[in-house]
Image: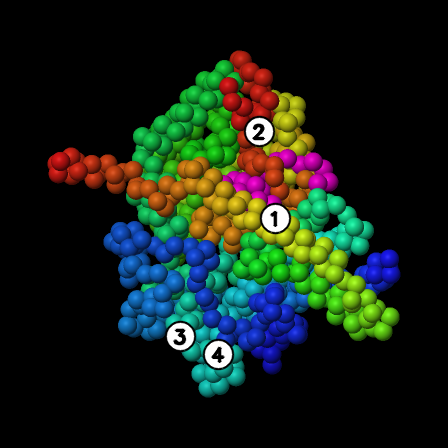
Amino acid sequence: MKLQKALEGHKKEIVSLWLERTLNSYKSSGFFKKENDSFANPVGVNIKEALNTIFDLLITNAEQLDYIEALDQIIRIRAVQTFTPAQAVAPLLELKWVIKQVFSAKKDTEPLLRELDDLDCDIDRLALMGFNVYTECREQVYRGRIKEIKSGSYVLTDAGCPSKLLQDRPRVLKNN
Amino acid sequence: MAVVKLDKLARSVAEGPSLMTGAFPTKDWMEVPAVYKPGNYAYPTKPDILNYLDSQQGINLPNAREWNPEDDDWKLPDNWKDIIIQGMADRLDKFRSLKIFMDCCVRCGACADKCHFFLGTGDPKNMPVLRAELLRSVYRQNFTLAGKILGKLAGGREMTVGILKEWFMYAYQCTECRRCSVFCPYGIDTAEITIILRELLHLLGIGINWAMEPVANSNRTGNHMGLTPQAFKGNVDFLCEDIENLTGVKVNPTFNRKGAEVLFITPSADVFAEPGIFTCMGYLILFEAIGLDYTWSTYASEGGNFGLFTNNEVMKKLNGKMYAEAERLGVKWILGGECGHMWRVVHQYMETMNGPADFLEIPKSPMTGTVFENAVSTKMVHISEFTADLIKHGKLNLDKSRNSHIKATFHDSCNPARAMGLLDEPRYIMDHVCDWVEMPENTIREKTYCCGSGTALNTDEIMELRMRSGLPRANAVKYVRDKHDVNTLTCVCAIDRATLTTLCDYWVPPVQVAGISELVGNALVLEGEQRQELDEGLRTLV
């Protein structure tokens, strides 16, 4: 109970450090942190919204399924950026470090560090769910690729020009 | 100094990096090399394609060879550096705009956060100002007094293989959409910087096959797909059969008919690939409904001009074929379909490359008498201008309820919007044929976000890149999908139709993509029709 209150009380601090560190994974992150218009800054704002939601769900002991939408909001983006799979889902696990960092800096929350085991487990579960979402996104990219190939546009690069094939045909026949 | 400010733009405020998330910048942008890995580059041009093109009159595309971007050795000609510097000198001399763009940027940063590649990647070299700096630094070093004397202190860089690799990476992470130019106080056309970068790379035989094979096909048979005249006509005939099955009306287009009033040119994807074929059925139904005296050409059978993504010689040649065909057939003017970059070429380069088209007449709609004064120079009218004029004059019998399965939003395709100012005509048409809503203000009209796959980047080997660069567009579509139940994204560009489909599948399912003319075709009430119940309009399977 005490832990939950502390998490609620320090939400702003925790989420803002969490967001800061997550956005630091981009080479040039200043803009992603600064701009609040979600249409001008889809990466920054979507990640911010997702982390906020995920934290709220954590402190209200939400059901696993409730996390999917927020996890999708952040992981779908990171799944197509230049991260390794581990880097893509790493921000979820980083929450552990962030909470410890915030709690250890203050006298009133410092004793709570020893009570974080359950929360750590929740965050682990969250990361595993995040990995599922990541894999789903990657599979979707591959499906998109196959769909484009099947739809016929591959002839642009991979098929011979029909008129060239027609030119080649007599030679093939002669050889036979 | 201004260069310091530029560094600030690129610098992250990251401190205390975590081992888990990684990717922190530890070096100045100039020191970060371009690293090629599977999935982050489009495949290089096949040597036989390049050899064929180089053998063609008016086209100079040398140094064909097998090479792999992932290799250290790109098998460059020995004098590659001289070729590049001379290539720059030639272009600075030939294109005054390039000289101005090299000199006048003050690094105000207005463009920096406007590029969909930057917004999707967070990579500072995708800020238009920095992408241009990749070229500008070499320009300073070799062509300015300060750069020659002070070198790096004046923001100059000695040309190296590393810089060449950087050019190839970032010239192909720009879709020449020109959103950044809208925000530039000096009006620097960053697309032209990309064009020049690509031109210079082509001098060394460095290009991508997804651009060059369509170019070769277009040069040979008249269209990207390499369709022979028979195949092209066959595909259109198939669509006519489909229209007859759906509506009971027989449509009889003509091909290569001399003396027709109008020559119709559209991207070949419209006659070949979904969902463009439905747009094409829309054109055919519209022309039948108004009894237009027009012809298709099986030679000018491509609106797209991948020359714009290659070099100015190829662009000129591919554009010239449309006008040569119009002259040969003796038409009065040209009607253009829903193509994107064709309109950039026609509106902004045609006049100086192949103009004036004196043998054509100023376009005048035979149905309404409207004279398209805006096309005095090009003699070419956009299908949306033409259709909107027909609606305005009450020439079309439209039943909006036939699109009741559609709740649409409109994506301003970059080139028609920013390169020819086609903003209101598609909206006017949509008002009359379907129920639709706008996306947020900073993602439409002149500020529209690119699909992320233009300039021949619509290839599957860089799918992740396409998905992240398309995020700003998809994010706005998601907003109207969630808020207004939008299920269809309309547009007026063939590359859009193909690539936004994949983009929406990833980010905003189940939103579909449709051309405006498809919705017109859905809504048009034809004389003598025996239309079936078409729950999904022209897409209904019967």
Q: Check the image and report above or below for B14 versus A123.
A: below
Residue A105: x and y in percent read 79, 73
The residues bearing labels 1 and 2 have C-alpha atoms spaced at a distance of 39 Å
**Count of numbered marks:** 4
Residue A50 in view: yes
Return the residue nearer the eye: B354 or B528.
B528
The answer to whether mark 1 and mark 2 are in CB contact below 8 A is no
Instruction: Decide if residue A103 is on the left or right side of residue B118.
Output: right
Q: Is residue B499 magenta?
A: yes
Residues at badges 3 and 2 in contact (C-beta under 8 Å)?
no
Which residue was labeled with disc 1?
A133
Which amino acid is tagged 4? Gly
**For the magenta stretch, what is the residue range?**
B482-507
Of the residues shown, which amino acid type is indicated by label 2? Answer: Val
Which chain is indicated by disc 2? B
Q: Which residue is mark 3?
A: B160
Kindly report the distance in space between the C-alpha atoms of the residues bearing marks 3 and 2. Answer: 53 Å
Marked residue nearer the N-terminal end (2 or 4): 4
Residue drawn 61% across the image and 39% down it? B509
- Label 3 crowding class (10 Å Cα cut-off): few <14, some 14-19, many 20+? few
SS at circle 1? helix
User: Which of the chains bears the disc numbered 1?
Assistant: A
- Identify the image quadrant of residue B357: top left
Q: Chain of mark 3?
A: B
Q: CA distance from mark 3 to mark 4?
A: 12 Å
